[in-house]
Amino acid sequence: MTADATTRWPPISVVIATVDRPVLLRRAVSAVLDQDYPGPIQCVVVFDRGEPKPVDVEADGTHRELKLIRNTRTPGLAGARNAGIDAAVGELVAFCDDDDVWLPGKLVRQVRLWSEDPAASCVATSIVIDGGETQHERLAPARTTFQDFLRSRVTAIHPSSLLFRRADLLGGIGFVDEALPGSYGEDYELLLRAARTGDVIAVPEPLVRVDWARPSYFAGKWDMISDGLTYILDRVPEFAGERRGRARIEGQIAFAHAARSRRRPALRWAGRALAHNPAQLRAYGALAVATGVVPAQWLLDKVQERGRGL
């Protein structure tokens, strides 16, 4: 691929996993099919834990196709995304959550950027977090390495912005990990594997609106969160050499245990986090919750008011 006038516009398949949110789904699908992208777009909607239902969005059937399928793999987000990858016909594969919205120009900007740096493993964009009454821009780094992802989740790189080569998802990078407990952290684990094969690059402009005006699917599912993060620590041995990044995840695990009123594991994980990084704020938050100083939800609300999560 080369940029500008000679840019090649390969066919793209967009995978949207959904569970019974028809109004939000229609909004997400419309934004995908309305992209001003010169090449073909296939939108694959994967219905998880249910049969496909009509989506009231028109597709011309030539350059824009809407395909509705049922998740026949492992129930959950990871299996649903992989079912979409299976059904995809595009050379490139993108993901979009059913409650998020692509802004005009997303795919064009990503393909042009990738044409300038074809060694990159995937392409993201910056995002806008929509909290209803507040909007927060999160600007993704122009380039993120594997070491960067070990150190930080880099939350400005959101799964709804990601664009991959389908061949890489079938080969070198691999599918979304369906063994992750509850699919929690599946995007982060996938980005770690992708970044092992090449840097992740990003369009600087926010071209995805991420909807935070409603509770996350994982809100309050503390067992799922602690199990998922523990799984990632166990699966990525390089965390052993990155104390700051390991402490970040250990602090999150500690907080999840504290929120479930599991004092002993909360204190144990918080201690590990602080041993690796004495400045790890999540560990102090876990200690405050575990010892009854503040409720977990109060602390979460304060953080999310700033468009961030724990």
Image (cartoon, rainbow, N blue to C red):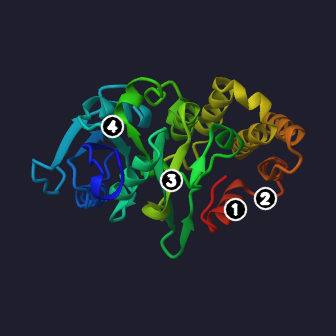
Q: Residues within 10 Å of mark 4 (few under 14, many from 20)?
A: many
| Mark earlier in primary sequence (4, 1) | 4
Task: Measure the alpha-carbon separation of dots 4 and 2.
Answer: 36 Å
- The residue pinned by badge 1 equals 298
Q: Where does residue 10 sit, x and y in percent of width and height?
A: 26, 43
- The residue pinned by badge 4 equals 48
Examine the rendered structure and indicate whether residue 50 appears above or below residue 41: above
Quick one: SS at disc 2?
loop
Kindly check if marks 4 and 2 are in contact, taking CB atoms under 8 A apart as contact: no
Q: Is residue 175 left or right of residue 229?
A: left
Task: Measure the alpha-carbon separation of dots 4 and 3.
Answer: 29 Å
- The residue pinned by badge 2 equals 294
Mark nearer the viewer, 4 or 2: 4
Mark nearer the viewer, 4 or 3: 3
Kindly check if marks 4 and 3 are in contact, taking CB atoms under 8 A apart as contact: no
Kindly check if marks 1 and 3 are in contact, taking CB atoms under 8 A apart as contact: no
Quick one: SS at disc 3?
strand
Foreground pick, 128 / 195: 195
Q: Identify which amino acid the numbered label 3 is placed on.
A: Ala
Task: Measure the alpha-carbon separation of dots 3 and 2.
Answer: 38 Å
